[in-house]
Amino acid sequence: AVQLVESGGGSIQAGGSLRLSCAASGYTGRMYCMAWFRQVLGKEREAVAAISTGGRNTYYVNSVKGRFTISQDNAANTLYLQMNNLKPEDTAMYYCAASRSWKGGDWCLTKMSDKYWGQGTQVTVSS
């Protein structure tokens, strides 16, 4: 079975940096879409960043552009999210998602259907 395991979350002061990792296993072939989402308790899960297979294209929501960088190590089947200049509003549970499908960059970034999910890693940013 496909397994996605996130790590790297923690508590940090505003302005600091964290690097999240997502180790993917349990499948053969490629995941054509990999993405990060986040969710605050009581609110809907929201998109953060996405990347197409091979890292050719990356996609970000406006609120993280210029601060977050998504990347992947295909050999290690690992997805990363480098988060710089963190703000209190970045506080959330961060989830890794992956899909064998490709339905466009917007779909990869924003839609939650047809994706595998990890259990999440908590990021807490204090002011």
Image (cartoon, rainbow, N blue to C red):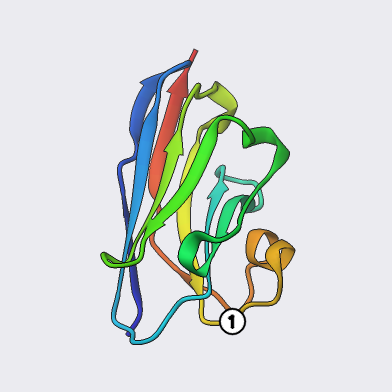
Looking at the rendered structure, the kind of residue marked 1 is Ser
Q: Position of residue 20 (x, y in %)?
A: 37, 44
| Residue occupying the point 72% across, 38% down | 62
On screen, 115 above or below 28? above
Q: Position of residue 38 (x, y in %)?
A: 55, 48
Indicate left or right for 75 with 108 as reference.
left
| Residue occupying the point 40% across, 64% down | 118
Q: Position of residue 124 (x, y in %)?
A: 43, 30
Q: Residue furthest top?
A: 127
The residue singled out by tag 1 in the image is: 101
Residue 122 image-quadrant placement: top left
Looking at the rendered image, the quarter that the N terminus falls into is bottom left
On screen, 75 above or below 86? below
Indicate left or right for 33 with 62 as reference.
left
Residue 111 image-quadrant placement: bottom right
| Residue occupying the point 35% across, 80% down | 2
On screen, 126 above or below 54? above
Indicate left or right for 46 with 69 as reference.
right
Label 1 Cα neighbours within 10 Å, binned few <14 / some 14-19 / many ≥20: some
Q: How many marks?
A: 1
Q: Position of residue 14 (x, y in %)?
A: 47, 16
* Secondary element at tag 1: loop
